[in-house]
Image (tube, helix red, strand yellow):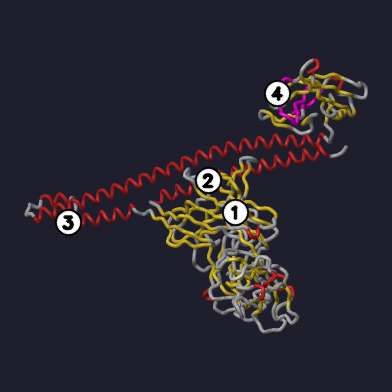
C-alpha cells in the first residue's frame, strides 16, 4: 500500500506543481507517490484508473518522471473530467507471471465543477480555491527567499572583503612595530659602539654617524621611543564575569573578541508555599528545614529576595546551633550540621514595626530564591531548575558606551501618587526617546520608584511602573517623561546616563538538520566559543528530561526532583552567528540579556592602531549584522512557507 501526495503542492526542481490551469487542455498533474518503503519506483510500471458517475472505469496513463524520488505525472483523460465527485486510483506493477506484484493506492476523490469561463476545473478532496490561493503565496515566498539569498551572498562577499582589509591593515601594523623595534636596536648598538670609540680615543666620526640627523644620540633614542609607543597602541584587556552587566574601563575604539559564554543551571530549592503571620509582623516559608527535599547539611546557600514593594528589612533562619543569620534582601547562610533538629522555618521581616506591615498581597508577590553556593548571580525570580536562556525569546549580547552627564532635573512630588512616602523627592527626564537605553544611578538612595508618563499634569497615570533596581531602562513609544521617586533627600547622588552608541548581537545557532536558526539554552556544561577558523560554535553537552529516581545522588545531573539537567554521552556542535562586539573610547559596558540566569562570560577587549581600522571593524560588524538579518529574513520566509504548508495539510484533513 502507498499514498499519493496529491492535495498538497510539492517542490521539484524549483517548481511547485499542483494547479495545472484548465485541465481540459492542460490535463497533467505532477505529484509524489509515498511508498513507505525504499522510496523508489525503479522497475515499476504505473497506471491510473478513473471512475465517474457515467463511466465506472476509465484507464489513464501515468508517466514516471523521477523514479528515485517517486515523482510521476498523472494524465487525466477528457472523459474523466465529468462535473461532480469522481475517483482516482494509481496502480504500481512490478515483475511478470507468478512474480508479478500489483500495488494499488487508496482511492482518491476529486471534484470537477463547471467554470464560468471555458473548460472545467478540478479540486482534490477539499476546498480547492483556498489551495490555489495558498499555492500562489508559496510561489511568491520562494521568489522572495531567492532574492533574499542573493542579497545575503552580496553582503557576505562585502563582509569578507572588509575582514580581509582589516587583516591586511593589522599585518602592516605588526610590520611597523617590528621595523621600529629593529631601528631602535640598531640605534642602541650604534650608541654602544660610539661609547666604545670615545673610550678608545677614536675621532667623533663614528659618533656623528650614530646620531644621524639628530643633535645627539639621546635625541635619536627619544624619537625612536615615541615612535615605538605610537606603534604599540594595540592593548588587550582580558575580562571574566558571571554578571549580566560589567563596565570595562580605559577602552579605546576597538572590539571585544573571543567571546566565550559558559552555560549555568541553578536550582531554587525554596518552595513557594508562604504563610503570613496572623499579626502581619513576618511571613514564613511554610516548611521546616528538615523537610526541604534538596537541602544539604553544613552547606552555604545564597539567598536573594525579590521585593516589588520595598518593604522587606531582613530574614533569618536557624543555621548552626542557635546562631541566627540576619541580612537585608540578600545574603549567605550556612545550614546546620544535623538537619534532623532544624525544625525552625525561614522567616522574612518588614522594615517597619507596624504590626500590620505585611499585607497578604505583599506576601503573595514577594519572591525568594535560595541557591547552593556562596556567590550566585541571579537576575530575577524563578522556580525549580533554570538555565541560561530559559523562559526568554532570545539571548542578546551588547556593548555600549555612555555619556555620564546628568540629563534631568528635580520637581515637587505633589502631583504624583505612585510613591507613598511623603518625604520623597522626584527627578524627571523630559523628552525621552522611545527605544533609547537609559541607566539610572541611584547613589545612596535605598527606596525608589521608577515610572514613565506622557504628561506632567496632576492625576496622570504612569505608563510603566517598577521599583526594582535596573541597570538599564527602555521607555515605550508613548512615554514623554521618565520619573524617579526617592525616599531620601540625597538627590545629588542620583543621575541618568544615556547610551549613545551600542553594538547588539543575538545569539543563535544553525541547526543543519532542520536548516533553521535557533536560540540556544545554555545549560550546565554547555558553551559558545570561537574556534581556530575564526567562527563561533555552540557546544551542546547537556540535555533536560523528567526526574528519575536516584538523580539527586548523581554528580553529573542537576535536579529539583521534577526536572533534571544531565550530561550527554556525546556532545553536539553547531555553528553560531558572530558575536564579536565593538568597544568604544573611554569605557564600554558589556550587557547580556538571557533571563533569570546569566552565563559566565570571558572575552578580550582589544584596542588597536588608528581610526581606519576602527572604521573598518565597525563596517564589518555592520555587514555581519546585515548578513545575519538577511539570513533571519530568509528564516522568516521559511517560517511563512512552513505556515502555509501547515495550512495546506490542515485543509487535506478537513472532512467533506
Magenta part, dominant SS:
loop
Q: Which residues are magenta?
A: 20-43
In the rendered structure, the answer to whether residue 160 lies left or right of residue 132 reads left
Mark 4 Cα shell of 10 Å, populated few (<14), some (14-19), many (≥20)? some
Q: Residue 468's x, y, as percent? A: 62, 69
Q: Earlier in the sequence, mark 3 or mark 4?
A: 4
Please name the residue that numbered disc 3 is placed on: 216
- Report, in whole angstroms, how far the alpha carbon at label 2 lies from the one at label 3: 51 Å
Residue toward you, 87 or 305: 305
Location of the C terminus by quadrant is top right
Q: Earlier in the sequence, mark 2 or mark 4?
A: 4
Residue toward you, 240 or 144: 240
Task: Assign a secondary structure to mark 3.
Answer: loop
Q: Earlier in the sequence, mark 2 or mark 3?
A: 3
Q: Earlier in the sequence, mark 3 or mark 1?
A: 3
Mark 1 Cα shell of 10 Å, populated few (<14), some (14-19), many (≥20)? many
Task: Assign a secondary structure to mark 4.
Answer: loop
Q: What is the number of the mark on residue 522?
A: 1
Amino acid at each position: 500500500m502507498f499514498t499519493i501526495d496529491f492535495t498538497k503542492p510539492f517542490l521539484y526542481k524549483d517548481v511547485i506543481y499542483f494547479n495545472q490551469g484548465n485541465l481540459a487542455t492542460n490535463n497533467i498533474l505532477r505529484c509524489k507517490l509515498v511508498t513507505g518503503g525504499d522510496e523508489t519506483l525503479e522497475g515499476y510500471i504505473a497506471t491510473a484508473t478513473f471512475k465517474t458517475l457515467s463511466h465506472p472505469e476509465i484507464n489513464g496513463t501515468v508517466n514516471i518522471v523521477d523514479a528515485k524520488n517517486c515523482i510521476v505525472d498523472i494524465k487525466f483523460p477528457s472523459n474523466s473530467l465529468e462535473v461532480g465527485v469522481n475517483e482516482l486510483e494509481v496502480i504500481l506493477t512490478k515483475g511478470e507471471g507468478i512474480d508479478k506484484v500489483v500495488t494499488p493506492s487508496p482511492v482518491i476523490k476529486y471534484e470537477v465543477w463547471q467554470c464560468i469561463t471555458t473548460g472545467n476545473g478540478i479540486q482534490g478532496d477539499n476546498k480547492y480555491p483556498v489551495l490555489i490561493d495558498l499555492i500562489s503565496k508559496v510561489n511568491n515566498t520562494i521568489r522572495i527567499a531567492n532574492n533574499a539569498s542573493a542579497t545575503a551572498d552580496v553582503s557576505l562577499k562585502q563582509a569578507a572583503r572588509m575582514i580581509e582589509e582589516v587583516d591586511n591593515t593589522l599585518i602592516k601594523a605588526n610590520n611597523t612595530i617590528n621595523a621600529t623595534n629593529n631601528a631602535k636596536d640598531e640605534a642602541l648598538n650604534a650608541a654602544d659602539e660610539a661609547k666604545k670609540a670615545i673610550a678608545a680615543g677614536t675621532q667623533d666620526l663614528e659618533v656623528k654617524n650614530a646620531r644621524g640627523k639628530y643633535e645627539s644620540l639621546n635625541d635619536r633614542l627619544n624619537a625612536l621611543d615615541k615612535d615605538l609607543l605610537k606603534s604599540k597602541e594595540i592593548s588587550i584587556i582580558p575580562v571574566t564575569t558571571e554578571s549580566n552587566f560589567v563596565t570595562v574601563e580605559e577602552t579605546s575604539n576597538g572590539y571585544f573578541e573571543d567571546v566565550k559564554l559558559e552555560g549555568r543551571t541553578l536550582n531554587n530549592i525554596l518552595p513557594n508555599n508562604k504563610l503570613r503571620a496572623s499579626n502581619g509582623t513576618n511571613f514564613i516559608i511554610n516548611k521546616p528545614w528538615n523537610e526541604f527535599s534538596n537541602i544539604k547539611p553544613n552547606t552555604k546557600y545564597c539567598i536573594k529576595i525579590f521585593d516589588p514593594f520595598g518593604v522587606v528589612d531582613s530574614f533569618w533562619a536557624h543555621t548552626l546551633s542557635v546562631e541566627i543569620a540576619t541580612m537585608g534582601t540578600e545574603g549567605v547562610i550556612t545550614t546546620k550540621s544535623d538537619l534532623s533538629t532544624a525544625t525552625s522555618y525561614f522567616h522574612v521581616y518588614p522594615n517597619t514595626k507596624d504590626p500590620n506591615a505585611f499585607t497578604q498581597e505583599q506576601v503573595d508577590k514577594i519572591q525568594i530564591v535560595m541557591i547552593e553556593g556562596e556567590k550566585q548571580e541571579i537576575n530575577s525570580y524563578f522556580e525549580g531548575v533554570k538555565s541560561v536562556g530559559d523562559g526568554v525569546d532570545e539571548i542578546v549580547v551588547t556593548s555600549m558606551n555612555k555619556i555620564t552627564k546628568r540629563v534631568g532635573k528635580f520637581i515637587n512630588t505633589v502631583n504624583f501618587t505612585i510613591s507613598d512616602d511623603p518625604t520623597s523627592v522626584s527627578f524627571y527626564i523630559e523628552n525621552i526617546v522611545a527605544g533609547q537605553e537609559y541607566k539610572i544611578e541611584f547613589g545612596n538612595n535605598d527606596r525608589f520608584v521608577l515610572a514613565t508618563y506622557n504628561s506632567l499634569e496632576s492625576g496622570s497615570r504612569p505608563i510603566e511602573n517598577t521599583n526594582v533596581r535596573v541597570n538599564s531602562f527602555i521607555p515605550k513609544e508613548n512615554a514623554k517623561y521618565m520619573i524617579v521617586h526617592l525616599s531620601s533627600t540625597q538627590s545629588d547622588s542620583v543621575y541618568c546616563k544615556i547610551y549613545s552608541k551600542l553594538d547588539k548581537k543575538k545569539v543563535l545557532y544553525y541547526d543543519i538538520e532542520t536548516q533553521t536558526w535557533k536560540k540556544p539554552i545554555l545549560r550546565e556544561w554547555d558553551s559558545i566559543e570561537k574556534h581556530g577558523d575564526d567562527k563561533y560554535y555552540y557546544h551542546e553537552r547537556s540535555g533536560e528530561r523528567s526526574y528519575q529516581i536516584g538523580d539527586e545522588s548523581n554528580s553529573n545531573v542537576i535536579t529539583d526532583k521534577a526536572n533534571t539537567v544531565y550530561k550527554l554521552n556525546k556532545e553536539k556542535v553547531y555553528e553560531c552567528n558572530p558575536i564579536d562586539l565593538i568597544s568604544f573610547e573611554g569605557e564600554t559596558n558589556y550587557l547580556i540579556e538571557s533571563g533569570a540566569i546569566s552565563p559566565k562570560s570571558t572575552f578580550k577587549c582589544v584596542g588597536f592602531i588608528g581610526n581606519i581600522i576602527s572604521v573598518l571593524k565597525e563596517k564589518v560588524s555592520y555587514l555581519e549584522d546585515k548578513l545575519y538579518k538577511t539570513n533571519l529574513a530568509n528564516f522568516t520566509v521559511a517560517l511563512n512557507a512552513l505556515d502555509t504548508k501547515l495550512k495546506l495539510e490542515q485543509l487535506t484533513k478537513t472532512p467533506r
